Image (spheres, grey):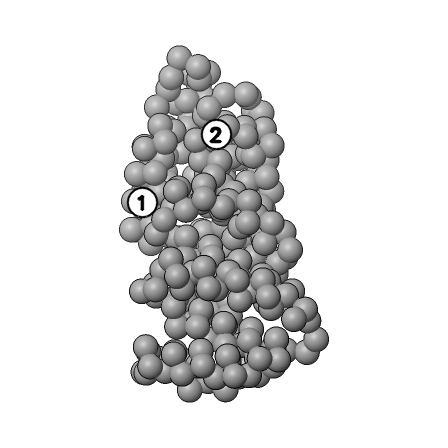
């Protein structure tokens, strides 16, 4: 049985410990968003504390980083340093700790308290990812759908992943018309995506579950023609029970 959670993007989103590339990218993101360094609007002590937290982050000392970050967040101050600390708490819990519940808590807290934060769109994407990985597909679907063009503009290198996960949400809800629609969007926008083989296979499965075996076979032939050495090209189609056609 194919687990669609493992297809296409597993290597791109590990959840054990950020590697050096991920840490560097996150640090650059932080600098781009202006989340390092005191500003006139910051309480100086919180700004300085956040700078020290970033040093721990850059050094890969995520345990110390989280301990100090929690202490900063608990001041509950209404300033940029605390807002950035909340985002960082969500990020580290998701990617370094693998604690999706706690990551969701901090992402939700940031969006509620600081809805105009520069990382709000990215936060919504990460929050939807947490719901998805927890198997809360309805909430994940709402989150991915709400991102829409904003998500595409904020992270075009990940939008194929967003589109694929959105299709999976529909598929696991047994809404095969929805999964077909989203997969067709993905394949049209990103025909050379690394997720294209998985998307084609899920599209064939969706047609199979819609009681349209002819189209299912056609998509499988397309998969075999475009990616003849991919394992999914020889995978049998197994039908889900029930669902919306």
At a point 62% along the width and 58% down the height, the residue shown is 137
Q: Earlier in the sequence, mark 2 or mark 1?
A: 1
Above-or-below relation of 101 to 133: above
Above-or-below relation of 242 to 71: below
Question: What residue sits right under mark 2 in the picture?
Answer: 117
Question: Could you tell me which secondary element the residue under label 1 belongs to?
Answer: helix
**Front residue (pair 204, 17):** 204
Residue 15 visible to the viewer: no
Where's residue 104, x and y in %? Answer: 58, 46
Question: Could you tell me which secondary element the residue under label 2 belongs to?
Answer: loop
**Front residue (pair 147, 92):** 147
Above-or-below relation of 206 to 26: below
Where's residue 17, x and y in %? Answer: 41, 55
| Residue 232, label in figure | none
**Front residue (pair 237, 39):** 237
At a point 34% along the width and 52% down the height, the residue shown is 157
**Front residue (pair 158, 19):** 158
């Amino acid at each position: 049985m194919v687990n669609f959670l493992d297809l296409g993007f597993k290597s791109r989103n590990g959840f054990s410990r950020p590697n050096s590339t991920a840490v560097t990218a996150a640090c650059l993101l932080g600098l781009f968003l202006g989340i390092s360094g005191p500003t006139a609007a910051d309480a100086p002590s919180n700004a300085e504390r956040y700078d020290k937290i970033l040093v721990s982050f850059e050094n890969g000392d995520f345990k110390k980083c989280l301990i100090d970050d929690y202490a900063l967040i608990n001041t509950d101050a209404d300033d940029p340093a605390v807002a950035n600390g909340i985002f960082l708490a969500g990020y580290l819990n998701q990617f370094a700790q693998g604690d999706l519940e706690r990551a969701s808590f901090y992402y939700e807290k940031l969006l509620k308290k600081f809805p105009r934060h520069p990382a709000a769109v990215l936060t919504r994407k990460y929050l939807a990812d947490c719901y998805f990985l927890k198997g809360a597909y309805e909430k994940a679907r709402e989150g991915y759908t709400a991102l829409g063009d904003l998500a595409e503009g904020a992270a075009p290198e990940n939008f194929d992943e967003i589109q694929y996960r959105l299709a999976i949400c529909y598929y696991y809800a047994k809404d095969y018309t929805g999964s077909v629609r989203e997969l067709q969007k993905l394949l049209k926008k990103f025909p050379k995506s690394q997720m294209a083989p998985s998307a084609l296979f899920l599209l064939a499965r969706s047609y199979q579950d819609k009681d349209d075996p002819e189209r299912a076979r056609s998509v499988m032939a397309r998969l075999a023609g475009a990616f003849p050495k991919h394992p999914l090209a020889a995978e049998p189609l197994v039908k889900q029970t029930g669902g919306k056609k």
